Image (spheres, grey):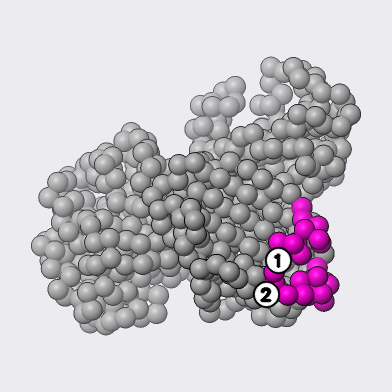
Amino acid sequence: MSRRLLPSLLAVALVAVMLVPLAVSARQASTPPPQGYRGSDGPQGYRGAFTDLVGEIDAFWAASFEAAGTAYASPDIVVVDRPLETACGPVEPVPNAFYCPLDRTVYLVPQFLVDQETEFGDYAPIAVLAHEWGHHVQALLGIRTATTKPMELQADCLLGVFTAHADETGLLDYGDFLEALDSAIDVGDPLGLPEDHPGAHGAPEERVKALTRGFGGGAVVGCALPLGDGAQAPNLPLPPDLPPGPEAANALVLPQPVAAYLPGALPMAHAACFRIEDGGALGFDELVGRLAPAPDAAARLTEWGWQESAFLVFACDDPPPGGAGYVDVGLHLFADGPAAQSALPYFAAARAGGTTLLTEDGPPIGDASVLLSGPVSNGTEATLYATVGPMLVRASAISPSGEPRADVAAVARQVVTVAGPMAGAAMNAAAYLPGALLLPQMGCFRVEEGLAFDLDGLAATFPDPATTADWLRSAGWRDGARLTFACDDPPVGGAGWVQVSVHRFADASGAQGAADRFAEGRASGSALRFVATPTLGDYGVALAGPVANGTEVSIYASSGPLLIRVTGVSPSGEPTADVQAVLRQVLTTAS
């Protein structure tokens, strides 16, 4: 590797003694201007070779965002020399490096970089940090998937993008690119991320392919990054110190029942582990009973103009260390934003009463928030209450082996974003999957299957996988997910099986083109026929016909960069009305 970029990783080994204090973020110290790497608010204290390392990566992405006309903020960097509590959970001073999207910080143990240099060569430490910077880029653009693997492979791809830049600017020596490939092939958690599920980062050949796609294709084409070149980059979320004011909270009107905003998938690394265990609507008397023995619950709910409540319970039998194994989401609709904010401390006090849960200020989510945490019989509970307009959101999680604060924050943030005025741009496809179907037979349905797509897996569902994969790339496919619901005893003519899928593209034209192609793939080799399409979304295509277990109706509709498919099968009729109702539900949430 060229000595312009990193004269010696021995300097990195000494970085812990260069920092005062030892565990410091980019916001907390200073550095001379010639070698200054600036964090979110100001310079920090890395010197010499390490400054070159982080400064080169940060400068590259800052310039890339500026060229695309998109706001950029540098991550903070914290050297871990002792056990720390982070927004993503506890971290130990063991050789490691990882990025936490909740506080936009790279956490690292310098020895890990030294170990990487020793094993793979002097470019390997840069591969580590360039990968972590890839996760920071994802966080800035609001990219999130239902499972870890697509995120990891895209971060590998973004490592390849930076490596190409380093090569073009003369910063690479012969063999440096091979060192990056070698570090990607090392599957013993080579990039040290906290999501340590087997295979979560991708198989070695997948990681190599991802890195080379970024090296040869660039961020937008090679890595499907929604940045520049005509791509519509999502708006950055509001910064933590600028939550929506009371006026915005009072003005927000939710167009659907609160059950429509229950999450169909949880924004966690181990989302695939969860099943929906319970859920439904809560009547006035039921809610009063749940608030007991809090005083005057009925009078308070009436005063605040309570309208409706719904909940959904998720369970995971084998959560990862520190992860939630139980998640309960509750939504309550009141007359307006101020009423919801008045209800927030009352609901929190009712939950904490008679328990060991302690109350503290919540993270900057929604219009107002309160966090409860403490030990319970089966682990540690974290419960976050937040308001968005007239809705009070509760996300509770229990972890048998850690404190699930980050999990409840992620769940609450997803619900608030989908329901709030910022909905749309910054959410991944899985965020729009419904947790409940707003149908007359709603209580009959259970979630049978959930799935997040990668591009090759999606292409494999078509008659021509290779051609479809190329087409998806050219159309700017970003991510996709689906949920399948089943009802054993549907009403006559009603759907007994419903599947909802959502796919996100770079722009509206990609989503509209996909409606036709996806419908043609669905109809191929079946008895389904194209039928008149109802006026739903920006553009739509509909299919209907006999299938093995009844009559199917499928409607594909685009809404901006999203393509939504709703398929219903009825054993005793044509479920057009049910399919249209579910499609309207998802479209309304996505708009």
Quadrant placement of the C terminus: bottom right
Query: Could you tell me which residue is drawn at 14 percent across and 46 percent down?
Result: 119
Query: Could you tell me which residue is drawn at 53 percent across and 56 percent down?
Result: 397
Question: In the image, 478: left or right of 258?
Answer: left
Question: Does dot 2 land on a helix, a strand or a loop?
Answer: helix
Count up the numbered dots.
Answer: 2
Please state the horizontal and vertical placement of residue 475, each as a whole percent of the image.
Answer: 58, 41
Residue marked by disc 1: 291
Query: In front: 140, or 28?
Result: 28
Question: Does dot 1 land on a helix, a strand or a loop?
Answer: helix
Quadrant placement of the N terminus: bottom left
For the residues marked 2 and 1, what is the alpha-carbon distance in whole angstroms?
A: 9 Å
Quarter assignment of residue 513: top right
- Specify the amino acid type for callout 1: Leu
Establish if 185 lies above or below 85: above
Label whose residue precedes the other's in the sequence (2 or 1)? 1
Disc 2 vs disc 1: which is toward the camera? 1
- In the rendering, which numbered label is found on residue 346? 2
Q: Is residue 121 magenta?
A: no
Please state the horizontal and vertical placement of residue 211, each as a whole percent of the image.
Answer: 34, 44
Q: Is residue 294 magenta?
A: yes
- Specify the amino acid type for callout 2: Tyr
Question: In the image, 143: left or right of 532?
Answer: left
Residue 252 visible to an observer of this rendering: no
Tags 2 and 1 in contact by the CB under 8 Å rule?
yes
Residue 192 visible to an observer of this rendering: yes
- Give, as a single range, the part of the protein colored magenta: 281-306
Please state the horizontal and vertical placement of residue 30, each as a whole percent of the image.
Answer: 27, 82
